Image (cartoon, rainbow, N blue to C red):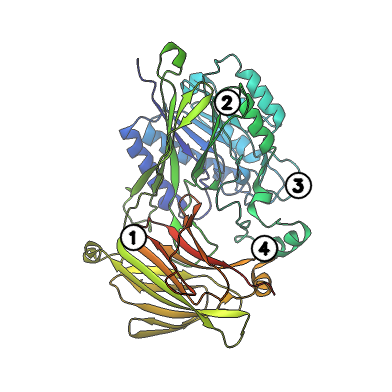
Amino acid sequence: MTSMRRTIVQLSDLHLGAFAAQEALVIEPLIAALAALHAAQKIELVAITGDLFETSSIAITDAVAIFRRVLERLRAALGSDVPVVLLPGNHDRRASGLLGPHDAKLFDALAGAADPRCVVTGCKTPFLAETIDRELHALPWLVAAFDSSYLPTGWISAGGILRQDDLLQLADQTSDEPPSTPLLLLTHHHIVPTPLTDLSRVDVNTQSVILRWAARNVLARLLSNADHEELMMTALGAGTALSTLHAFGRPVVVLHGHKHFPVARALSGPHTGHGDVLLVSAGSAGMSLTWTESDLPDVARLWPSFNVIEIDGAGDAALDATPWTIAVDVVAFRPRRTEEDPVAPRVARRPLLRARADGLRWDIDPVAGDPVSVGTRIRALSATAKVLPNAARGGLRADLGWTVRVVAEDSELERGDDRTYYLCEDAMEGASLDDLCIGEARAGDRPLPARIEVPLDGTVCTYRVVGGLCLTRSEATRVRGELAAFEDVTLLNRYESGESTLTVEGVPDGVRAFGSVLDLTTGHERPARVERPAPGTIVLRVSPCPTRTLLQVRWPLVRD
């Protein structure tokens, strides 16, 4: 039979207008990456799943000009006939995505400025779901968009809504299609929390000092966890929406953004006649984000990325036709460091999801999903953190004495660039960095947060973080809040490494430390076996160690 293979690109969270040089540093490499992809495999549809702009308070004339410019560049790279479907996110509705009131003017203006091959959804409120005309997208699947950003009341929210009435109306509008035809549903907000970000705090770093203080103190004291992502950013009705999508009685794929981490999940329908739901989250296509709140230069950043979705098959196994298959890959691209850098991006592509439709179900083919490393490669990263007494705060705090050594591959040293490995030590109340030495050369003391430059030729770097560890739960609570129950020592592997080793010596007596490995590209964290060569010593070893991997050793704090 004739192949029905189609390629869809999901862009999300571009946050246009977030900084002055964004179009040159990120958007141009994005367009170049899309053009290269289109040359290799024809793109049939571009879906932009929200947060096109950083703020709804942008001047409408400026927003329209930026939108038209980006759309024209997409057309130039992919051809004028490629359809684009755009839906709003919380940043397109509220100032900085958080502060109200809800504002629809921005997307109303974009709808008026769009060309005939670009559908701007989210302009029919209070009605939130709409099907996308098959004459536009020409896909063999059903395609629908849901404006989850609609929260017209309240002055503070980054969340949204998945209203039951709209989903039931969507089910009715698609009921004439055979149950074997999958539904591709586009929305901005997540239905199931995404890894790592569901525990992180609401980002208010760009807000005023008063607002930052209020978010960190007043909100959290009035409403438990009000300063955390998941309470403020979840879509109202997500649980009901998930059950209803199962009850559509067809295989469903949900593409969403909002959390900036590319993650895929498969959720089985629990009852007879229910369909399975695949949830696919996209990273940010317009931002190179840090995984911490630090604003230090050269702090490890996540590359911008977009999802590539390939669908194939004829979809009717009962007629001996090829069943529908779906393959989702993440394409991450390196942003330009300066506007003078070449535009052609360095890209990395890795599999995120492979599935095959079996009636109403999705059969999953597991993928490795490991990050694809590009750029600098190192032979080994080794670090030893020794827990040392703190004279000023005996019994409450301890110091950490670090010894770090990085050895790059010979070919990397011969290239002459990227010859420094950057360590970043975050700030902690009452802590400081002392006795920094690079080889035999003393580099002195530094305030925290601090950036430490470690040569790639194996030169040993040593320093001491004074007061860097809490020894009791009461001290950790005072510094970090009531949720503090564990202390940890971490080591970030910035580049692909043959082996990365974190050794912690002097773990407090009577506690059992444990290890984990966190993939900062996806937010996935897994337990990791550790070695215990001597009492109070823990060794966590990862070999080989992918790019952007965080090694962590934790232990429970003493109750006092």
Q: Earlier in the sequence, mark 1 or mark 2?
A: 2
Q: Are marks 1 and 2 in contact (CB under 8 Å)?
A: no
For the residue marked with disc 1, what is the amino acid?
Ser
**Image position, residue 52 (x, y; %):** 54, 43
Element under disc 3: loop
**Residue drawn where x is 46% and y is 28% of the image:** 83
Query: On the rendered image, what quadrant is the N terminus found in?
Result: top left
Name of the residue lying farthest toward the bottom: 391
Residue 483 marker: 4
Residue 497 marker: 1
Element under disc 1: strand
Residue with the mark numbered 3: 154
Q: Earlier in the sequence, mark 1 or mark 3?
A: 3
**Residue drawn where x is 42% and y is 57% of the image:** 548
Label 3 environment density (alpha carbons within 10 Å; few <14, some 14–19, many ≥20): few
Label 2 environment density (alpha carbons within 10 Å; few <14, some 14–19, many ≥20): many
Residue 275 marker: 2
**Image position, residue 377 (x, y; %):** 30, 59
Residue nearer the viewer, 286 or 276: 276
In which quadrant of the rendered view does residue 486 lie? Answer: bottom right
Q: Earlier in the sequence, mark 4 or mark 3?
A: 3
The residues tagged by marks 1 and 4 sit, at their Cα atoms, a distance apart of: 34 Å
In the figure, 453 relative to 43: above or below?
below
For the residue marked with disc 3, what is the amino acid?
Gly
Residue nearer the viewer, 533 or 14: 533
